[in-house]
Image (cartoon, rainbow, N blue to C red):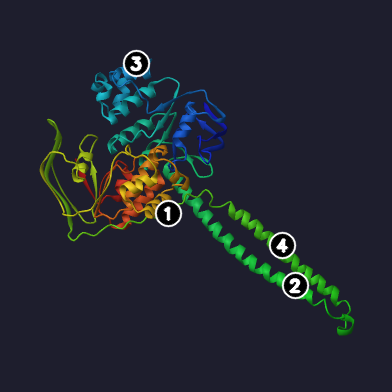
Amino acid sequence: MSLINIRELSFEYDGSFEKVFENVDLQLDTSWRLGLTGRNGRGKTTLLKLLMGELEYTGKISSSVDFEYFPYCPDSLCFTIDVIREIAPKAEDWQIHKELNMLEADESLLYRQFSTLSSGEQTKILITGMFLRENSFLLLDEPTNHLDIHAREVLAAYLKRKSGFILVSHDRAFLDACIDHILVIKKMNIEVQKGNFSTWNENRKRQEQFEHTQDERLKKEIRQLERSAKKAAAHSDKIASTKIGFDPAKTEKSVSRRTSIARKSAKLMNRAKSMENRIEKNIQEKNKLLNNVEEVSSLKLFPLKYHSSQLIDFRNVSFGYDDETVFKDVSFTVCQGDRIAICGQNGSGKSSLIKLISGENKAYQGTITIASNLRISYVAQTADDLYGTLDDYIEIHRTDESLFKAILRKLDFSRELFLRPIESYSQGQKKKVMLAKSLSEQAHIYIWDEPLNYIDVLSRMQIEELLKNSGATLLFVEHDKRFCEQIATKQIYL
């Protein structure tokens, strides 16, 4: 057994207001299939870069294995077989063919130029090479982003046969299928548990429910103690006042009454002080609760109603590039209230279909009928064109500023992020900007192309609940199996 030891690790980016990690202590077994997850911007990719030694930090990281980071960037002009041999120079041909077979990758890919492969094919090739490399511990940073649902299932089955990797992913079904331990970067600490995402999530819910119950109990007890303490103190003052202003020898049969009153007053005052101490202790205990609870606030969406049921109609639509057909004779109808998932393997034309509806001028055959004056809110697949400040983005897109920023806050954006340039955001934070813009728009139909790429798990759950309760019409492409199962009322297969 080999261990990765992390001791008193601290790190912050130049110009940042707060540290990403502070005095972190971790011990990880290199035989684990370890999932790494957490809210966007918490430092998942940063942790992988620290393990790789790419960033300066204080503290100590020690391990007997060599860390390898995915995605690896090879010479794209090389043949694929040469890329694998560059990564794993000692790998035998039979080992390469075996790994490719496990990933359902065609062996003919080996003799093509790497740059001609699709993103999904490149992912499979790189993972093949990296697992064949000797004494390597893989750091897989969101390897599923370019894979369709079936390819994700294949990769999950492949990873389950392996040991010794850290996997960053926000796909719940994928994590559940291939990991045996999970590391979660939370608000106040880093948590490691045995099991998969679902077991951790159940534990999280139970812990948060316990803390909410304890918090309510303590608040109620504090209120009761405060009332009792005030009564005891007031009663003590009232009794004490009877000692002054008269001569007990003349007005009372017993001259010892003044002493008796003093004892009673002191007893009540001590009781009030004791209750104040209990109040302070309860407040301290209460302050320890809920600090690490991930707030998952409800989102709201106000879609527009159209005057007729049918919004979009495809009739025998075919599309292709040059002489190559992408899809052929596709027919479907979108009606108000539908939540339609467009499904298919990589390269089947899902994004092309979405772009046709969204107004990109591409030549096609068949009939596409879009209701007149239909208002469409569109989220593109990539966030490559985001730049400048949030205020610039708001002005360019004429977005409702208060609503837009309120949505971002509910999606776990800190106020500090509002002041930073968008270029400095993580990929997940950039995607949240695009989603927040769409959610702040009133539209008849929302068209989203892989909206959840890089989006953290808790935000996915927020968006799921929103869509299920809003009555919005949605046409979307997404490879998160659990999201599709929760949201889609219909599916179109290409």
Mark 3 is surrounded, within 10 Å at the Cα level, by few (under 14), some (14 to 19) or many (20 or more) other residues, namely few
Provide the residue designation for mark 2. 237
Task: Compare marks 4 and 1 and give the one earlier in the sequence.
Answer: 4
Q: Is residue 102 visible?
A: no
Marks 3 and 1, how far apart at CA: 52 Å
348 sits to left or right of 85? left
- Residue 472 lies, in percent from the top left, at 27, 55
Task: Compare marks 1 and 2 and give the one earlier in the sequence.
Answer: 2
Q: Which of the 4 image quadrants contains residue 400?
A: bottom left
Provide the residue designation for mark 1. 297
Give the amino acid type for the residue marked by disc 2 in the picture: Asp
Give the amino acid type for the residue marked by disc 4 in the picture: Ser
Give the amino acid type for the residue marked by disc 3 in the picture: Glu
Marks 3 and 2, how far apart at CA: 90 Å
What is the secondary structure assignment of the residue under circle 3?
A: loop
Marks 4 and 2, how far apart at CA: 16 Å
Task: Compare marks 3 and 2 and give the one earlier in the sequence.
Answer: 3
Labels 3 & 1 near each other (Cβ < 8 A): no
Give the amino acid type for the residue marked by disc 1 in the picture: Ser
Task: Compare marks 3 and 4 and give the one earlier in the sequence.
Answer: 3
What is the secondary structure assignment of the residue under circle 2?
A: helix
- Residue 96 lies, in percent from the top left, at 32, 20
Provide the residue designation for mark 3. 92
